[in-house]
Image (cartoon, helix red, strand yellow):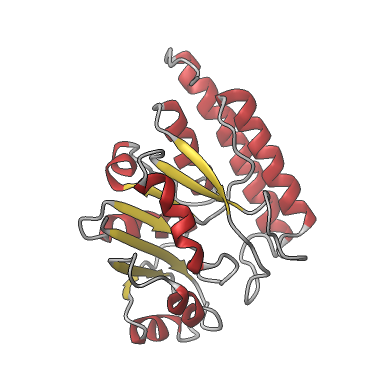
Amino acid sequence: MRVSVVIPTHNEAQAIERVLADLPSDLTTEVIVVDSNSNDGTPEIAAKMGALVVQEPRRGYGRACLTGLATANSPDVVVFLDGDYSDRPSELPILLAPIAEGRADITLGSRLQERRSAGALPWHQVFGNRLAASLIRLLYGLEISDLGPFRAGRAEVLRALALEETTYGWAVEMILKGALAGFRVVEVPVSYYPRIGKSKIGGTLKGTVGAAWFILSLIVRYYFQHRRAGTPRPA
């Protein structure tokens, strides 16, 4: 498979070298670092490590992911990964296995199933992720436990979903549209560690509340939009 890895960054100079060094080179065709106005040398470090660096001055995590997806060069699979070294890039084989074996169209790395390091996720993030996952199970019939950022999808599926959320909604849009379209969304356990550097979302009250409200309201809104459109609930 041709595998493109997309890594959104903003001031991740402390971590990006470790992230890129840990990616299994035999599984990755290209690595795209989408940088949003870093002023700490992140793009320069990434370029020296061999990544393709794309500048995306417009704000928004989802926008960076969409830019990376549009930049990817004829991939079979696109992987999304944060640049803070909280997920372990060396676990890429775990994420790719269900797709490579023909069992999944989209895979999600769950931080809440097994090997989460103490203090990696504050209690309010654990609660928010479990609440969102429970709502998705209830409304969409999709058995997931987390909305983790370490995820992968077949490129043709991601294109078919016409993803468009540019901010917090990126975490859930792929899941909801995938479920509603009948694609196979499979969760796999991944380890999770305290991030290097300060979180731009979960590390602030404003970011945490904003993300939670946006994600939960999006889950409900998508559900009722598709009910009105006559889309059946996935099995």
Q: Residue furthest left?
A: 74
Q: Nearer the viewer, residue 36 or 121?
A: 121
* Residue located at (64% from left, 41% from top): 145
Q: Residue 68: which quarter of the image?
A: bottom left
User: Left or right of 133: which side holds 55?
Assistant: left
* Residue located at (33% from left, 66% from top): 28
Residue 72 point in image, percent of width and height:
26, 60
* Residue located at (38% from left, 62% from top): 6
Q: Quadrant of the N terminus?
A: bottom left
User: Left or right of 158: which side holds 186?
Assistant: right
Q: Nearer the viewer, residue 160 or 5?
A: 5
User: Left or right of 85: which side holds 73?
Assistant: left
- The relative height of residue 218 versus residue 126 in the rendered view (above or below) is above
Q: Nearer the viewer, residue 64 or 153?
A: 153
Residue 104 point in image, percent of width and height:
41, 39
User: Left or right of 139: which side holds 62?
Assistant: left
Residue 136 point in image, percent of width and height:
60, 31
